[in-house]
Image (cartoon, rainbow, N blue to C red):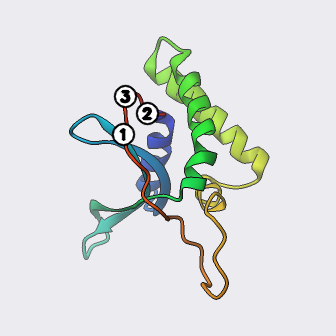
Amino acid sequence: MPRCVFKLLWDLLKQRKEVFAYVVNMARNGDHYWVFAHVTPSCDRQGQVVGYHSNRRVPAESAVRKVKPLYSELLAEEQRHADLRAGMLAAEALLVGKLTQLGMPYEEFAFSLCPPPTKGQGRVHCSDTRIAPTRGTAQ
């Protein structure tokens, strides 16, 4: 999982924005699995952020197939650098460049990977059948 995607997620949350992102999680037994995460800041009555709420769904397999090559490229960029922070920032610049070329922010990109709604459904669903966990290194 590219660290720059987590940086993007936290940068948006610090701005009090909700985030939708594809994330690779690791189970206790070492298996990796993909989720389509929706993360929002939780505020108290004074408007201060007091925590975060995350709703995770099994992503559409078609979306994971599309996001994996990008995450692999970002991860490779991060690993090209001996300094972890420098690698993360270089991968972030690569991600921002790709999103700029596409003319969309990450959230719009994330939703663009979702399968189109079926007739009469009226909204996009970014989840479908369960994706089997994989052992070992995740991308």
Q: Nearer the viewer, residue 131 or 67?
A: 131
Tell me, yes or no, whether the two marked residues, 3 and 1, touch with CB atoms within 8 Å: yes
Q: Is residue 137 above or below residue 115?
A: above
**Amino acid bearing label 1:** His
Question: At numbered mark 2, what does the secondary structure look like: helix, strand or loop?
Answer: loop
Tell me, yes or no, whether the two marked residues, 2 and 3, touch with CB atoms within 8 Å: yes
Q: Which residue, as the protein is rendered here, is positioned at the far top?
A: 82
Q: Which residue is mark 1?
A: 32
Q: Residue at x 66, y 33 (%)?
A: 94
Upstream in sequence: badge 3 or badge 1? 1
Query: In the rendered view, does 37 fall on the left or right side of 94?
Result: left
Q: Residue at x 40, y 48 (%)?
A: 132
Categorize mark 1 by other alpha carbons within 10 Å: few (<14), some (14-19), many (20+).
Answer: some
Q: Residue at x 25, y 76 (%)?
A: 45
Q: Nearer the viewer, residue 76 or 127?
A: 127
Query: In the rendered view, does 80 fall on the left or right side of 109?
Result: left
Query: In the image, which disc is placed on residue 136?
Result: 3
Quarter the N terminus occupies? top left
Distance Cα–Cα, label 2 vs label 3: 6 Å
Distance Cα–Cα, label 3 vs label 1: 7 Å
Q: Position of residue 88 (x, y in %)?
A: 50, 28
Query: In the image, which disc is placed on residue 138?
Result: 2
**Amino acid bearing label 2:** Ala
